[in-house]
């Protein structure tokens, strides 16, 4: 093979590869990003969502899912930036206010979290997560009455939610009512992922009031 022939073959192969890569659409990359996210490979998901955004920069769902992936990798500033972009493109999307409110909650920016969660409530009243997360915010702010009100509201919307049952248990632990705390904790363990719930309560300082109670010890024990 002469050098010229080799160069021609290389250019043909490279051109074919380039055409294949360029042939991918934003939807292709979006689908690959979703598939990666479902496998909890959030770094790969971010790569694919970013490629999709380069091809379709005004598609709000690409920023929405990349923002969620950034949250999972604890890149909170990037998550907020993407959620804010979604709001600019789709200002009445309930779920983006929930997501950005949750990020602000994780960052301890409680006023901003409440503002987003209340915006979600105004867009779609009577949905679970806005009340659930605002209840968590109030619990962290030690505004216990407000926390209980919101968690009870969340439970009226979804009585079987192990998330809300667990936070209700946490509320009763904070106000030092071990019987109610254990009752709600037992419900949460029955309704949801017991191993995850036990890990949560062991790491939460809010259960410190009842850690010496026998009912708590029995429920917290790995089974």
Image: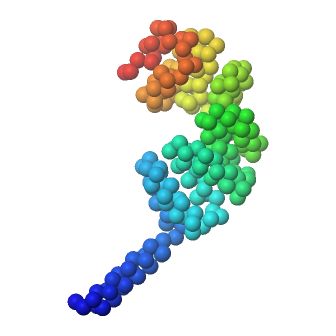
Q: Position of residue 191 (x, y in %)?
A: 50, 28
Q: Position of residue 84 (x, y in %)?
A: 68, 51
Q: Nearer the viewer, residue 100 or 126?
A: 100
The scheme the figure's colours follow is rainbow
**In what quadrant of the picture does the N terminus appear?**
bottom left
Q: Position of residue 131 (x, y in %)?
A: 68, 33
Whether residue 61 sits left or right of residue 221 in the image: it is right
The residue at the far left in this view is: 1
**Residue 217 image-quadrant placement:** top left
- For the image shown, how many numbered marks are present on the structure? 0
**In what quadrant of the picture does the C terminus appear?**
top left
Q: Which residue shows up at 64% across the image and 33% down it?
A: 108
**Residue 6 image-quadrant placement:** bottom left
Residue 87 shows up from this direction: yes
Q: Position of residue 166 (x, y in %)?
A: 55, 25
The residue at the far right in this view is: 122
Q: Which residue shows up at 59% across the image and 25% down it?
A: 167
> Does 61 sit above or below residue 193?
below
Q: Which residue shows up at 49% across the image and 30% down it?
A: 192
> Does 49 sit above or below residue 24?
above
Q: Which residue shows up at 47% across the image and 8% down it?
A: 214
> Does 8 sit above or below residue 133?
below
Q: Nearer the viewer, residue 77 or 67?
A: 77
Residue 152 shows up from this direction: no
């Amino acid at each position: 093979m002469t050098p010229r022939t080799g160069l021609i073959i290389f250019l043909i192969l490279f051109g074919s590869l380039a055409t294949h890569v360029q042939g991918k659409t934003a939807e292709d990359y979006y689908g690959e990003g979703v598939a990666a996210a479902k496998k909890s490979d959030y770094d790969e998901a971010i790569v694919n969502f970013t490629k999709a955004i380069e091809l379709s920069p005004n598609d709000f769902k690409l920023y929405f899912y990349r923002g969620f992936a950034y949250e999972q990798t604890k890149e909170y500033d990037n998550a907020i930036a993407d959620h804010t972009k979604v709001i600019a493109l789709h200002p009445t999307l309930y779920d983006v206010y929930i997501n950005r409110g949750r990020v602000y909650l994780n960052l301890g920016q409680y006023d901003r979290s409440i503002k987003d969660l209340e915006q979600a409530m105004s867009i779609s009243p009577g949905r679970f997560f806005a009340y659930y997360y605002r209840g968590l915010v109030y619990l962290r702010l030690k505004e216990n009455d407000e926390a209980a009100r919101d968690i009870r509201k969340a439970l009226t919307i979804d009585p079987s939610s192990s998330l809300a049952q667990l936070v209700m248990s946490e509320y009763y632990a904070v106000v030092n009512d071990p019987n109610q705390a254990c009752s709600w904790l037992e419900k949460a363990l029955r309704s949801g992922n017991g191993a995850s719930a036990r890990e949560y309560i062991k790491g939460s300082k809010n259960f410190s009031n009842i850690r010496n109670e026998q009912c708590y010890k029995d429920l917290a024990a790995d089974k």
